[in-house]
Image (tube, grey):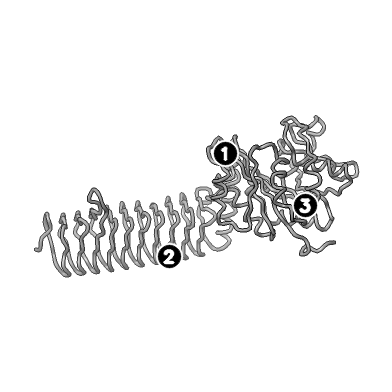
Amino acid sequence: MQSREQDLIAAVIMAAGKGTRMKSDLAKVLHPVLGRPMLFKVLESLKEVDCQLNVLVIGHQGDKVKEACADFTNLTFAEQPVQLGTGHALQCALPRLDNFNGRVLILSGDMPLISKDVLHALIDSSINNDEAMTLLSANSPEHKDFGRIIRTPNGEVDRIVEAKDCTTEEYQVTEVNLGAYCAKADFLRQYLPLLQPSNAQKELYLTDLIKLGREAKKKIGAVVTEDIDCALGVNSRFDLAKATQVLKERKLRELMLSGVSVLDPQSTWIEEQVEIAPNTEIWPGTILTGKTIIGSGCVIGPHTQIKDSVIGEGSYIVHSVLDTAKVEDNVKIGPFAYLRPQAHISSGAKVGDFVEIKNSNIGEGTKVPHLTYIGDTDIGKRTNIGCGTITCNYDGKLKHRTTIGDDVFIGSNSSLVAPVTVGSGAKTGAGAVVTHNIPEGSVVIGVPARPM
């Protein structure tokens, strides 16, 4: 048995295809599964196996794929300008492996469910059995479109036959190729150039390496996995939905085992990057996306959508939409509130029904209870904003800020025409239109507002 630590590992990820069955202008590998491009899942699994080099084969929308992968280090690119099959994709990557003499993982960028455990199994089998090439297979009668593993009478891997090229007898074989491999780099350099397009599609098949290796008396192995999900390649929108569903179930299970209550998993959508502390309840119809972070002891939902927002502890949010907002501890929001980007709600504040807040800071203990628009505004502590209040932040050309101090009372249906400042302790009468600054402790009424 060879030592795992003594062997260098590289990876080639095939991501050049257009994905015509997706019927999309977006490169297939950039389609999101649970909020992130499916390619990211493959690259993140590779991080867990300590690859010295990752080669990403790009083609269709290659520049967009490169840009999307900018945060991944230890990644180099090879271009496949014309897609002539999986064997051709690997040929395009071969120059990037010129100085590499270890083992090479060969994966597809459209397999978002491939796991680190499966990759470790491939590598370990290749090393421990000193195999020139190791493939991943499964016994799965339902995967009728997958290539069949054809074995010799003594059980050794002989060749792989693609489903469309199978004879009637070969088509009855239930052991299928899952499309992940581990091969010695020198084996690839020697036999990849020998591939021929002798198939129905006139393409170079990577799977033909198995036959070439066998003919040359090279040792070919297979790792049979029970993790059928790992083989779910995405070729259509339907496949995309199936892969997303698997990841969603994994995410919800992880959260519930950590102490988060998800009352109705079927109606709840929580993306992969979302973080939720224990003892928080997620009610039905809730959608949590992006880099949302939710503290402990919160109640979120029902029917609430939160994107890229931070929620403190003990907060209650119902029937509301939050987009890139920050909510501190013990805040009550909703129903039917809308917090737009850069809305910052301090501890103990309340944002009630049919309230919209954008690019504004709401102070501790301040209440914005009903039917109100707060835009480009800074509000102090313990202030009360009356029903129907509007901060008029746009003059037709430019946006302006409104400043409201501590312990202010804004009467119902007031309009604050920015730029304007309302001093601490001031009050406005119902229906006041404030066009000038109000000193601390003053009371104004009327249209335009004037001291009472």
Q: Nearer the viewer, residue 75 or 361?
A: 75
Q: Which mark is residue 312?
A: 2
Give me the residue at 56% from left, 63% from top: 258
Q: Which residue is mark 1?
A: 237
Estimate the spatial distance between the alpha carbons at disc 2 and disc 3, rounded to whole Å: 51 Å
Q: Reply above or below: 135 against 315.
A: above
- What SS does tag 1 mark? helix
Q: Which mark is residue 185?
A: 3
Q: Mark 2, residues whose alpha carbon is within 10 Å: few (<14), some, or many (≥20)?
A: many
Q: Is residue 30 rendered to the left or right of residue 307?
A: right
Q: Nearer the viewer, residue 311 or 264?
A: 311
Q: Which mark is residue 175?
A: none
- What SS does tag 2 mark? loop
Rendered location of residue 368, percent (x, y): 28, 59
Where is the C terminus found, in terms of image quarters? bottom left
Give the mark nearer the N terminus: 2 vs 1: 1
- Residue 110 visible? The answer is no
Estimate the spatial distance between the alpha carbons at disc 3 and disc 1, rounded to whole Å: 35 Å
Q: Quadrant location of residue 143?
A: top right
